[in-house]
Image (cartoon, rainbow, N blue to C red):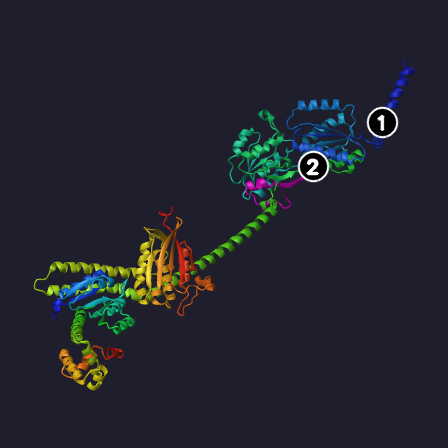
Amino acid sequence: MTESSAIIHVVDDDPSFRNAIARLLIASGYQVALYESGDQFLQNPPGVNPGCILLDIRMSGLSGVELQERLARLNTILPIVFLTGHGDIATSVKTIKAGAEDFLTKPVPKTTLLEAVDRALKRFAEKREQYDRLSDLRLRVSALTPREKAVFASVVRGRLNKQIAHELGTSERTVKAHRHSIMQKLRVRSVAEAVSIAERLGMLESGSEAVVKSK
Amino acid sequence: MIDGGVVGMLLRWVLVLLITTAFAGPAAAAVPLPRSVLILDGTDTNSPWGLAFRSTIQSEISEGSKTPVAIYSEVLELGRFNSPRYQELLRTFLREKYRDKPIGTIVVHGALAFQILLRMRDELWPGVPVVFAFVDRQTLSQVSLPPDITGTMSQLTLRSVVAAAKALVPNLKRIALVGTRFDKDPFRLQFTQELSSLANEIEFIDLMDLPLGEVQKRVASLSEDTVVYYSNIYPVGQQTTLMLGDVVPLLARESNRPVLTDNEKFIGRGSVGGIVGIPELMAIESAKRALRLLDGEPASQMPIAALDFTRPVFDWRQMQRFSIDEDRLPPGSEIRFRSPSIWEQYRWQLIAISAAVILQAGVIFGLLFERRRRQTAEQESRKRFREVVHLNRTATAGALSASIAHELNQPLGAILCNAEAAEVLLARETPDLAQVKDILADIRRDDRRAGDVIRHLRGLLKRREIELQEFELGNTIQATLNILQPEAIRRGVSLKSAPLQGAVQVRADQVQLQQVILNLLTNGMDAMEACSPEKRILVVESVLVGNSEVEIAVLDTGPGIPGDRLDGIFETFFTTKPQGTGLGLSIARTIVETNGGKIWAENRAAGGAAFRFTLPLARAQAT
């Protein structure tokens, strides 16, 4: 991922600041998309490009914090850097806890701004990678047949083949055959790796055992 | 031939003679005198002096006699008529007139009359006793007095005139003499002699016997050290139309110096007075003697007395006219026509008026004092109010520091980004100068914006007098909301405005109006603290009232105002907030009322409080 394809989304209701920061970012080599309100941003979802969001925390209409909450609900992975004219500690703590990448106060010098942007983009890259990897894993898991999914769910819970055969009403040999197929499809070489995948996909959470019982 | 008829006639004649002589002589003394008095007055008929003398004599004699007395009086006018021919005629006239009228006593008044009587008496009134009045010593010394004559010797003197004149005028040097020449004046014959002896002391200006017009001219321009002495003008020639008493006022009117007289009757008509002869006194004395003579008392028992019938009498008004000090007058002087001073005349009125004036003055002073105190108190309270308003404003500004910082940091942030962008652009090999120009323009604009924010802030925070202006209401409300917007967001309050359609011009102090709205909004936000976030709604709405006012309302969705608090909510130091000053609403009320409006609070039907206040519309708008 090259920087040139990254888009920085600036959401600020003050036109002169918006334009000024856009100038600076563009002169520094970034692409910029401008929004004058949180509503406008939500109506124009960012798309697949890498990037981050520069968000003014106090805006009339949808405030920055509200927007953050909404975006979190939409599972967007664009990192958010908050900008504000007033450094309010309570608010800044709230936003960081809610997962904001950074919190900057206006006026913000170029170096501070660009460092924060770079960190945000790196974070995006990391998140994207993580996201992609998870997507890939999910894809692999979705390739399993229902039988295979059931066996997989039990295997990662440490069930012996004998037990699994008994639960599913089939032979041990069939179970073994399924196991082989699962390992192949998931592209893992050990049970531990399979367990890791299950864990990462959140299959090991309590309440997911319901999957096993399906017949 | 001697016959008995002749003897008889002779005998008859001797008898008559005997009888007559028996009745005449001493035996006559035993016979009572006829009860009749003849007054021979030498003055003129219209002389006030003469009139006074004669009337006093007549009343004194009438009242003093037990039996009726016939009184005859003859006014001889010897001032006007004094020729030998006239005297001849007088004698004949009187003789014939009184032929059959027996006279008991004669009263003669004046030296000239006295002299003429003496010459006539033996023929006309032989043996009739005489009382003389107002005859001078010199005249008396020139005659040999028969035994049955008595009287009072008195005279006017020029010396007393001079004495009176000197008393009146301190540095007296001259006396202007006005009147008939002394040797023709029956009552002042003796003055001629005195003139020469007094000439050492006083310079006499001789205006005697001059026509009145001439005299008037001369006395109009006398020097400060002069007085005028008016004796008497016996009108002769062209002056015969003059009444004796009328000369004095004519003289006094023209004279620029005081006019002295020695005739009591001349006082009151312009003369300042002097040592004046009083005819009544003379008359009383003469009447007494006449009555005694009538009763048969011999004249020898009434020796001639020299009596002074003059008194110092002065006219107050003339004294005032010539600024003559009362203290200079001889002791015992009678001052007539003293106009009572204003004090004496209107004493009670003056007291009442003074009392009223003093009372009023007292009231006025009291009121002025009160006014001063009230003004001081008002000034004090105005000063306090300004201070408190200022405090409130600065307190509010402190609470709004967040939004202030935000307001400033926006333009400052933009400036910094712009400047750094320009740096980056200029570092390139071919800098985009057009864009740099744009950047610089934007920087300038943002700088001004920051300056405006600061100026506005300073304007808000300044201690200031009320400044009434006419401005558009909606803009000001919106500006206030903008100030509060960041704070509202921070507190999770939804801030809305429901403005009027169209522009509305109001007349008020713009800064104070903002302060009121800020106070009300802050209160509203405080009230809604306990509410859940989506229920925190603060609305500012405006609505026209009639065609002269606009009503602005701040509506919240808080718990509302408890009923028992509604009344006192605007009072000073009333607060429900733990850190409240209790001043916000009372300041709001004072501001609203000073700007000509009313403010009140009520609870909304759907819950929450409503604070409403009115402002007057601008004059151009109000119909």
**Decide: marks 2, 1 in contact (CB < 8 A)?**
no
Q: Chain of mark 2?
A: B
Where residue B38 appears, as percent x and y from the top left, is 75, 29
Q: Residue furthest right?
A: B4
Quadrant in which residue B276 is drawn: top right
User: Disc 2 on helix, strand or loop?
Assistant: helix
Rendered position, B259 above or below A173: above
The magenta region covers B308-336
The residue type indicated by label 2 comes to Glu
Q: Hey, which quadrant is residue B577 in on the image?
A: bottom left
The residue carrying mark 2 is: B280
**Marks 2/1: CA distance?**
40 Å
Q: Quadrant of the N terminus of chain B?
A: top right
**Residue B46 shown in magenta:** no
Give how far across and how far down residue B527 sits, in percent. 39, 65
Circle 1: element type: helix
Name the residue nearer the viewer: A81 or B287: A81
* Callout 1: chain: B
Could you say which disc has been placed on residue B21 in the image?
1
Image point (14%, 58%), residue name: B437
Give whichever of discs 2 and 1 has the lower sequence position: 1
Residue drawn at 61 percent across, 46 percent down: B344
Residue B61 visible somewhere in the drawing: yes
Q: Which amino acid lies under the numbered mark 1 shown in the image of this protein?
A: Thr
Q: Would residue B106 be found to the left or right of residue B354 on screen? A: right
Q: Is residue B221 above or below residue A130?
A: above
Give the number of the disc on residue B39.
none
